[in-house]
Amino acid sequence: MDYKKYIAEKISVEGVTADELYDLIALPPNLEMGDYALPCFKFAKILRKSPVMIAEALSKEIATDEVISEVSAVNGYLNFKINKSGFVRGTLDKILSEKDGFGASDEGNGRTVCIDYSSINIAKPFHIGHLSTTVLGGALYRIFNFLGYKAVGINHLGDYGTQFGKLISAYKRWGDKDTIEKGGIRALNELYVKFHQEAETHPEYDDEARAYFKKIEQGDEECQALFHWFKELTLKDVQKIYDMLDIRFDSYNGESFYSDKMQPVVDELTEKGLLVESRGAQVVDLEEYNMPPCIILKSDGSSLYATRDMAAAMYRKTTYDFYKCLYVVAYQQNLHFKQFFKVLEMMGKDWSKDLVHVAYGMVSLEEGTMSTRKGNVVFLEDVINKCIEKAYTIIDEKNPELEEKMDVAQKVGVGAVIFGALYNNKIKDIVFSYDKVLTFDGETSVYVQYTCARANSILQKGGAVTEYDIPELCAQEIELVKALATFPETVKAAAEKYEPSFIARFAVDVAQKFNKFYFDCKILAAEDEKVKNFRLALTNATLQSLKNAFGLLGIGIPDKM
Ligand code: ARG
């Protein structure tokens, strides 16, 4: 039962819709004040009365019933108390019957949401900078599917540009098949770094690289083969990481896929009179929108990142007929997205409004920043492995007898990396710290995992109860159930705001409330059988909710810790 909805429907305020009321109704910070509250401040203008008077008047209009047990007006707030046992039963029954589907819905109605995420660059390190796009995108992918959308995961590979000419040049000069085959991305990156070092004193290498890139484009057999080999090696290498993070894609159509799909874009722009020449280049002027021009073709006729993105957007619209197309890309690229979205709008593509740049902040390690060209980069794989190792050490220290320690360490370590990137509002810059993400009693995934192991062990002993009666309830129990009840709306909001952090925060909140309940109330040792049974059902529902939340984030939960 959606209590907010039930309450919203009971209230009528002239000129305010039930949906608006629904959005305004909030959970007060403490139980004394009520279970739900409607702030009346916004109505003062429409009704020409003070919020206090409005709340007073409304409180007299609304009758209590079997759901709402009390209505009161306090300082401009309309407070509601609801019948606790009905609420608790409704919530637990829902969780325990819907199980893995608790929080899911069919609001998406099968509509397609394209999600462009991870979108790595071929032959370049998969570094810590790709962490956020990968795990944010992966979480959004699962969240949208959970809400009845059809998510299409797209890895828009960076596989186009002179850097591939550079690689071919470097490979031919210094490379060796075996080393590259064994070394994968790292070996390719070394070649790339060496090329840049050497080209400083040999500028002719750069010309050679450009020529090789041209050859790839023209379909030269040898260059194409090398290019595809680099690509294969890169994808094989990153697959290990995708597997660890539980990341999947439906398409790997990257930039080079659009090589032959850009001409129609250029033609359409020309036809619509949007292209102008500027210092030899073909650009779309965006001065009117306070942006620098969007460059479509360079003076030598070659295309740009934006040109390929426009072709990609059009291709996605035709292929998937998306309801929304998301780009999970760092905020450094804000301007790029604003520019090409605008150009598509100017072309009359009404669907350009459905393109969304889901921008996120930077992740850095305490050790400092990096540059691909100089070679001092932090590989994501190393970060994950280090986290797993550290997790192993901690677990081994805390519980040396634990079975399958390595498997637990894997879940804890990987979970910590994912959670570290997802816990904060996505636009915030993050400084990744191993110690912080692996703290057992902080706002961390391992804290939540440990809570789950605790719940699991209780259920092992007492039974995973689903049939229960409602006893006299205490505040800890009610607080916990109230937190659990917010899961469906949390998932919905996470999708609306493209903010998986809402779900991460839900998990920490529930874990904290469960632990408070666990320490304050006896579960297995409860004297009254009815109380014990109810508490087991509540524990069961808590574990289920945390599993669903972590499932959406892509984090595993060990049975024991
Ligand atoms: N490969 C790009 C980078 O690493 C990100 C691509 C994002 N997706 C896109 N459609 N532009 O910066």
Image: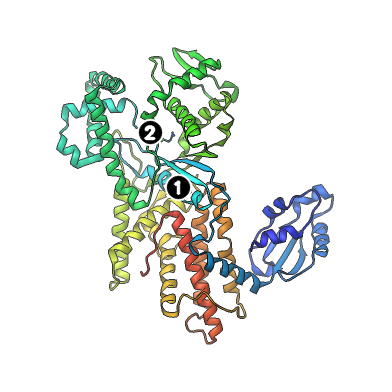
Q: Position of residue 40 (x, y in %)?
A: 76, 55
Q: Is residue 136 left or right of residue 32?
A: left
Residue 63 visible in the current orientation: yes
Q: Which circle's residue, 2 or 1, is located before the other in the chain?
A: 1
What residue is rendered at 61% in x and 69% in y? 90
- Quadrant assignment, res 223: top left
Give the mark toward the camera: 2 or 1. 2
Would you place residue 15 above or below residue 457 in this image?
above
Tell me, for residue 453, which label it has, or none: none
Is 281 rendered above or below residue 237?
A: above
Quadrant of image for the C terminus? bottom left
- Asked where in the image residue 83 lies, by quadrant, the reply is bottom right
The residue carrying mark 2 is 254
Q: Residue furthest bottom?
A: 527
User: Is the N terminus in the top left, top right, bottom left or bottom right quadrant?
Assistant: bottom right
Find out whether the residues at labels 2 and 1 contact each other: C-beta distance under 8 Å: no
Picture residue at 76% right of the left edge, 67% below the top: 71
Q: Toward the viewer: 319 or 58?
A: 319
Alpha carbons under labels 2 and 1: distance apart: 19 Å
User: Closest to the observer: 498 or 317?
Assistant: 317
Q: Is residue 196 visible?
A: no
Classify 10 Å Cα crowding around label 2: few (below 14), some (14-19), many (20 and above): many
Name the residue carrying label 1: 136
Residue 509 locus on image (x, y percent): 52, 63
Left or right of 486 in this view: 201:
left
How many labels were placed on the picture?
2
Does label 2 point to a residue whose CB lies under 8 Å from ligand 1?
A: yes
